Image: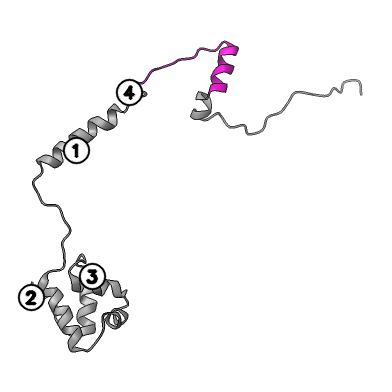
Amino acid sequence: MAGLSQDWEPVVIRKKAPTAAARKDEKAVNAARRAGAEIETVRKATAGSNKAASSSTTLNTRKLDEDTENLSHEKVPTELKKAIMQARQDKKLTQSQLAQLINEKPQIIQEYESGKAIPNQQIISKLERALGAKLRGKK
């Protein structure tokens, strides 16, 4: 038993390499300085200023100013609004009853009848089936 000796060296199992953020934090940099390691400091061109954000916004605003196109969503045409209202009233249904028939919220029927909704072909076809009227043929 004279040849036996105890190994007191620490064993580290699965130690992750430090992440980029951990390598850059103040403690790690100071520890590297004390150890005498080389430390590279690089000043970014736009550090501490907001130049990148402001320069791109001026380009975007210029594009918007030059763009004369009227950008807006397509709304429900007047003839479709009137057709939905007429067909619903012919069947003696309220907006909420019609909404229940097509499994939609009453708000959607209100938006279609007031012309605020963005036309959705699926909803229009549900309305056609529930009301038994052709709504899209007039386009």
Q: Position of residue 89 (x, y in %)?
A: 19, 86
Q: Nearer the viewer, mark 4 or mark 3?
A: 3
Which residue sits furthest top? 36
Q: Position of residue 34 (x, y in %)?
A: 59, 12
Q: Residues within 10 Å of mark 2 (few under 14, many from 20)?
A: few
- Nearer-N-terminus badge (4/3): 4
**Residue at label 2?**
138
Indicate how the structure is coloured in the image: one colour
- Nearer-N-terminus badge (3/2): 3
Q: CA distance from mark 2 to mark 4?
A: 58 Å
**Residue at label 4?**
46
The number of callouts visible is 4
Task: State the quadrant of the C terminus.
Answer: bottom left
Q: Position of residue 91 (x, y in %)?
A: 21, 89
Q: Is residue 9 left or right of residue 45?
A: right
**Residue at label 3?**
111
Q: Position of residue 32 (x, y in %)?
A: 56, 16
- Nearer-N-terminus badge (1/4): 4
- Nearer-N-terminus badge (2/4): 4
Amino acid found under the numbered disc labelled 4: Thr
**Residue at label 1?**
60
- The magenta region covers 26-45
Q: Is residue 25 left or right of residue 61?
A: right
Compared to 106, does 8 lie above or below?
above
Residue in front for this viewpoint, 96 or 25: 96
Query: Does the CB distance between marks 3 and 2 fall below 8 Å?
Result: no
